[in-house]
Amino acid sequence: MKISATLEYGLVAVLDVTKSSSAGKRITAEQIARNHQIPLKFLESILAQLRAKRVISSQRGPNGGYLLLVDPHTYTVADLFRTLEGPLAAVRGMAPETVKYKGNAKNLTDVWVATRAAIRDVLEKTTLEDIVDGDLPNEVTRQVQKKGSWKRRPAKN
């Protein structure tokens, strides 16, 4: 699974907006960009997408900035992923369950569906509030505590 810069920066920005909104404050794009070394123009483009999808709102002026419109207790990483990137898992742009194989590859559809289910187990159960508060769901802590989770595995030749 590859996480795009758009998704990574979008999530980081929404987490900052979540934290400031919970304190009753707005946060500017400049503050977010500076906090995370995100190119401002790129961040502004992502924030515009999030505004258009009604995840955040913005206000101009001296007290301007961004506020969260979604409920951080229920809005998940999967929700943001789908907002910015589309489906969690796709095979050649199609839903995994719609891709059919023949012969020796006939069981590959099951592998793709299982992969999507595993991704859902983490991303659909992890809310913005969970991340900001550092109280991650069991699905996340169980995965990061598995032996070898933190070790990158090279391709086998």
Image (cartoon, rainbow, N blue to C red):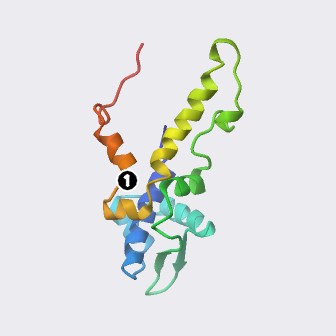
Q: Secondary structure at mark 1?
A: loop
At horizontal 42% and vertical 70% (from top left) the residue drawn is 18
Residue 108 image point, x, y percent: 61, 23
Which residue lies most toward the front here?
A: 138
Q: Which residue is mark 1?
A: 137
Residue 95: quarter of image: top right
- Disc 1 marks a residue whose amino acid type is Pro
Q: Position of residue 100 (x, y in %)?
A: 71, 25
State whether residue 145 is above or below residue 138: above
Residue 11 percent across, percent down from the top left:
45, 58
- Give the quadrant of the C terminus: top left
101 lies above or below 123:
above
Asked if 1 appears above or below 101 in the picture, the reply is below
Mark 1 Cα-neighbour bin, 10 Å: few <14, some 14–19, many ≥20: some
At 46% from the left edge and 53% from the top edge, which residue is drawn?
A: 125
Residue drawn at point x = 53 percent, y = 70 percent: 70
